[in-house]
Amino acid sequence: MTAGNAAKLYCLRLLDEAAARAGGEFRILDLGCGDGGDFVELVRRRENVSYVGVEPSQRAAAAAARALPSARIVNAPAYDIRDEAADVVVSFSVLEHVVDRARYFDAVVANLAPGGRVYLNYDSGHFYSDANPVERARAIVGSLLARAGDESHYRAVVTDSELEAQVARTGLHVVDDKGFNTELKVAWRHVPAEQREAFMKSWLAFELDLNAAGIGYRPYLYRTRNVILEG
């Protein structure tokens, strides 16, 4: 089970269900896979899942290759990836670190099979926190380094209008739009390890209830916006 992020847990549950229904091969392309830890359980559970992770950090890509020995890990930026069409393209907590978001979305669409889905979430809470000047300083430094050609530390808020413009430009459309990761994300850090799995389930259920009640994504309430897109 993914730890400390209700948005990822929500997506992984849906992906597990989709893989179970697929019958044959179910291809997942993860554009910004990090160390691959989010997908270890899914790949183990579903033998029909074919997972390809793309990660620009050499260290993180090496960790992903160790964590997912049956997967294919590509150590490269996502921008120019053109792989075999995937049933699902995943982007977890990546978009806020992407400098050229138009090129990133172009890669998403170019690698998506007809009828496929995109599971995308991005974090915004730390950009709005008045109590976290360190995050704001990191954002400034990351922007300066990106101008010099080093994108590895970049972070910048993703606005609603920016996301909507990229979705419209690429011909995608939103089929699911939710907010996740309230202050329960902070509480999770203090939960004893042996109780965290149960806490994650309760946390996700509570935030799904909030969304069902019409309390959708608001950056001051939720740290993460989660959208599911189709072509």
Image (cartoon, helix red, strand yellow):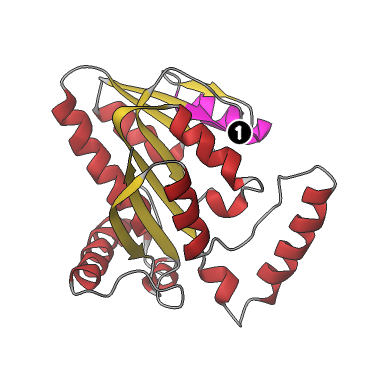
105 shown above or below 128: above
CA neighbours of label 1 inside 10 A, class few (<14), some (14 to 19), many (20+): some
Q: Is residue 212 left or right of residue 161?
A: left
Would residue 34 be seen by someone viewing this image from the given angle? no
- Image point 34% across, 58% down: which residue? 6
Specify start and end residues of the magenta stretch as a single range: 53-68
Badge 1 marks a residue whose secondary structure is loop
- Image point 16% across, 30% down: which residue? 20
Frontmost residue, 220 versus 73: 220
Most distant residue in the bottom direction: 130
- Name the quarter where the C terminus is drawn: top left
Q: Position of residue 88 (x, y in %)?
A: 34, 32
Q: Position of residue 110 (x, y in %)?
A: 47, 28
Q: Is 52 one of the magenta-colored residues?
A: no
- Image point 65% across, 57% down: which residue? 155
Q: Position of residue 68 (x, y in %)?
A: 44, 26
Would residue 84 be seen by someone viewing this image from the given angle? yes
Residue located beneath label 1 in the image = 79
- Image point 40% across, 77% down: which residue? 221
204 shown above or below 112: below
Q: Is residue 56 left or right of residue 161?
A: right
Q: Position of residue 70 (x, y in %)?
A: 41, 18
Instruction: Please name the amino acid that badge 1 sits on.
Output: Tyr
Q: Is residue 191 left or right of residue 141?
A: left
Determine the main secondary structure of the stretch shown in magenta: helix
Most distant residue in the right direction: 148
